[in-house]
Image (cartoon, coloured by chain):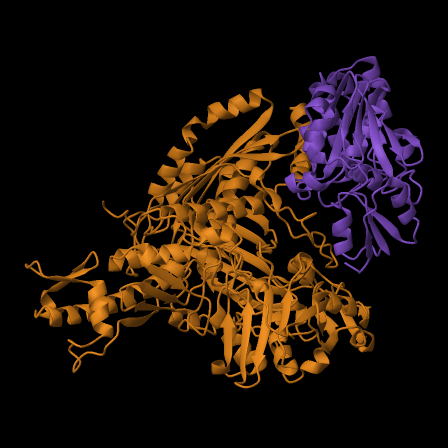
Chain colours: A orange, B purple
Amino acid sequence: MNAPFEGIGASVRRKEDLRFISGGGHYTDDINRPGQLHAYFRRSDRPHAKIVSIDTAGAAACPGVVAVYTAADLAAIGGVPCGWQIHSKDGSPMAEPKHPVLAEGKVRHVGDPIAVVVAGTRQQAKDAAEKLDIVLEDLPSVSSVTDAVAPGAPRVHDDVAGNICYDWHIGDKEGVDAAFAKAAKVVSLDLLNNRLIPNAMEPRAAVGDFDPMSGEYTLYTTSQNPHVIRLLMGAFVLQIPEHKLRVVAPDVGGGFGSKIYHYAEEAMVTWAAGKLKRPVKWTAERSESFMSDAHGRDHASTAQMALDAEGKFLALRVSTLANMGGYLSTFAPAVPTYLYATLLAGVYTTPVIYCEVKAVFTNTVPVDAYRGAGRPEATYLLERLVDTICHDTGLDRVAIRRKNFIAPDAFPYQTPVALQYDSGNYIATLDAAMKAADWAGFPARRAAAKARGKLRGIGMSTYLEACGIAPSKLVGQLGARAGLYEVANVRVHPTGSVTVFTGTHSHGQGHETTFAQLVSDQLGIPVSQIDVVHGDTAKIPFGMGTYGSRSLAVGGSAMVKAMDKIIAKGKKIAAHLMEASVDDIEFKDGKFSVTGTDKSRTLGEIALTAYVPHNYPIETLEPGLDETAFYDPMNFTFPGGCHVCEVEVDQDTGITSVVNFVAVDDVGRVINPMIVEGQVQGGVAQGIGQALLENAAYDAEGQLLSGSFMDYTMPRADDLPNITVGTESTLCTHNPLGAKGCGEVGAIGSPPAVINAVIDALKDFGVRHLDMPASPQKLWAIIQSNRPRMAAE
Amino acid sequence: MYDFAYQKPSSVADAVKALGAEDAKALAGGQTFIPVLKQRLNKPSVVVDLARLGLAGIKVTGEAVVIGAMTTHGAVAASAEIRRAIPALANLASMIGDEAVRHRGTIGGSLANNDPSACYPSAALALGATITTDRRAIKADDFFQGMFTTALEPGEIITSVSFPVPAKAAYMKFKNPASRYAMVGVFVAKGPAGVRVAITGAGQGGVFRHAAFETALSANWSADALAGIATPADGLNSDIHASAEYRAHLIGVMARRAVAAAG
């Protein structure tokens, strides 16, 4: 019987799911250390206030309390660092006010931690925290970017004038002005990209541990990138040398970006463990997650396209205000700049582009990368603008896209906003999506819906994103304070099974399966013989973690490089054993054979020889079969595709139902089609959530109105249609796998497809644009306000 | 939650006695109360668990459906007898919360709490239910006295609720998109208590009857009879999900749909 095919292209069932769905996962909150204490953070319930005084005596006297800390106790440690520096138009570095671990002098958002109580139990810590006597004096506050940049707005940071973190730009301003001057038509659109709260299923948690004998600290934390946390926290906050700091990110229940960043709570429990010589644990309550996990999106933009008489795009001008929140989160400055404005060419040949971005401090939770990070904002802006052009000019939505597409033979394609796309075929994904969605049959479905009293609409988005993050040299020039290569260590054991140590981190993506398939494919051994290890700085080499759809394109490439080394070394051993020339050894399906003979050795035999080197070329070759490779990509990868959404709107209630959704994406090489389908469906679910449901609502002063699931509308299964996923791949040309990435495409491509469909459904009501989310209340108001006019016509 | 004492008496009399303690609180299904405790919004001295009082059970006669106070939403939703006698009531129960909530939450707990977004108060009011307690019977019309406020005296325990079987009834719920509570819930009934329309989720004072709709439906039981009757937005809730005006509009939509569904 042949073994089932488990290599590249097989839908192998996810190895990790048995433990995830049977309660066998091992998460940070499952970790309990002997003698462990519990921390509880007392947080600000005010958006902006001066800290007049903090009296800790009452809390310190409570049962079980071991310590109470405020900013005054943390003078020796640093603030939470920012990992990316942007320079403004005038060359000045961005304003980078201190982000203290505990609030210093004032609080800047609801949820800002003021003090921490450490006690024997979580309950005791929480009881005592209520006894903290904290006197706050309210200050005027501001929550929206437009309010924050208005003259006379309250200052979030006293030394940051106008609340402007940076005033940055990219592109050719004069060229754009010139193109606009001679354009046949200019279409302009103001739009908001609504703020989202990530809401990973597992709340953040951290356990700090300290061994006084070795002087070694261990932090167990809910992180997407344990080495990044070790570097940031060790070097910048606590000044712990890296060889004395181990960071473990065990099973992590979803991240979506929110667990990339170094957070104050991690530093606090690690520091407190050292002070108290006892482990200290913190697990967020869900309400803390709402007000302390970095939020996503929150842009206000104006976009203008200059067109010729035939609808060809001549120039794009964009101006964006991006909300940073009260402090700079780890990668926040990069999101509305190099992950956003560089994407504004999209899939189109727009020859000149100019974009200016002001990043703005407000009295809200810090904003950072959230699934897609900048690319959803760029895609939403572009794809809404394209549909608005059609609204204003009467041009066809499909025809205008085709007319402006970068042609399949135009690659590599240099955009006017820095990126060079390596491959893509936007016509292929468009055609496939339209076919799968039966675009041509829509008028009949609209008519049928109308007969049922429903407004039916169809919309699309043709998008592109940049991921596989990222070439270190390039991002260094753009302000990154880190390299973004990846690493893999492939360890072939003496009996031929393999453990792979990867610097990426799986928090739902299925790496344990995908990477095992990759190894299975290359080394010719079954998936059951391969384990993937990640998430522990004591085990894995220094890697950069998982975000920006980078794990396969960058981490997988490192793995391929490491396996190349294994095979190259194996060939030398095989040549020695079979008394042949290395050049005559070929490796295929797990066997080293001498070309043209029936002589061969299995990988297991070679491995055993490598570890038991009795008959071995020991003078010229080290024993062992254990190779590490670092891989730094030469470029970003550029997945793209076409999403088509079909909706029905109930005119009486304003409820929008997504009745069909098709995503056809070019994600490059697919290792496991089932996992890709799941990743795209999950991303689309979040995109539909953003478009129709989710909104982090603040009032004008900065109180979070949607601070729980009672008011924050997370998408549920019954909000979602069956999502049809297809792939039409071109291969990435610059990595050994041809992989591009699939983790974020769903969340990037879908929101404009949904809104374009909603606006199409409201076609007869004269609606040109509406901001997300397209809630029932919003649609009802639009329908109401347009009904009298319709009746009059 | 804060520390509290816990008692699980085995008779109604003992439970009433236990609830006589200062700051004592009754625990039925706990689907509102436990989250409230976890958020430290309530600090009871003692929590008196009503689970062992034998108050769960469903009895259906030709005239009435009598439901024990500790009967879960899930049991009501699944009851074939209720589905035959008052399908609208079983249907309402099937839409409360999710499976887990319906498995624990009880009718007595819901009515005693009188959350302005709860579903059951609308059924009790529209069907003209009688709420029986350890000491008396209270008409639904007298029972609901404003948001989170009822006619129950301190320590008084609901033992059962009796719903007269109507000729026609239906419940339509516009769910809050986030919480899935009733943003507007409308229960219409034509029964022994006359034609009644009760609205939940919308009013600042909790559940209320809609006199204009009742008048119109008494004259002509049809969805069309409600066309053109505007509901004033005054006194309706307004929040990030729905303005008072939108709720007023939805009351009309849900009422028409309910009448149509009732047949």
Specify whether residue A784 is in view.
no
Nearer to me, A501 or A775: A501
Q: Which quadrant of the rendered structure holds the C terminus of chain B? A: top right
Above or below — where is A534 with respect to B254? below
- Residue A655 lies, in percent from the top left, at 63, 34
Q: Quadrant of residue B80?
A: top right
Q: Quadrant of residue B246?
A: top right
Q: Is residue A112 left or right of residue A509?
A: right
- Residue A747 lies, in percent from the top left, at 50, 49
- Residue A412 lies, in percent from the top left, at 30, 56
Residue sitting at 36 percent across and 58 percent down?
Answer: A515
Q: Which quadrant of the rendered structure holds the N terminus of chain B? A: bottom right
Q: Residue furthest top?
A: B220
Above or below — where is A398 with respect to A771? above
- Residue A732 lies, in percent from the top left, at 31, 56
Q: Is residue A719 left or right of residue A614?
A: right
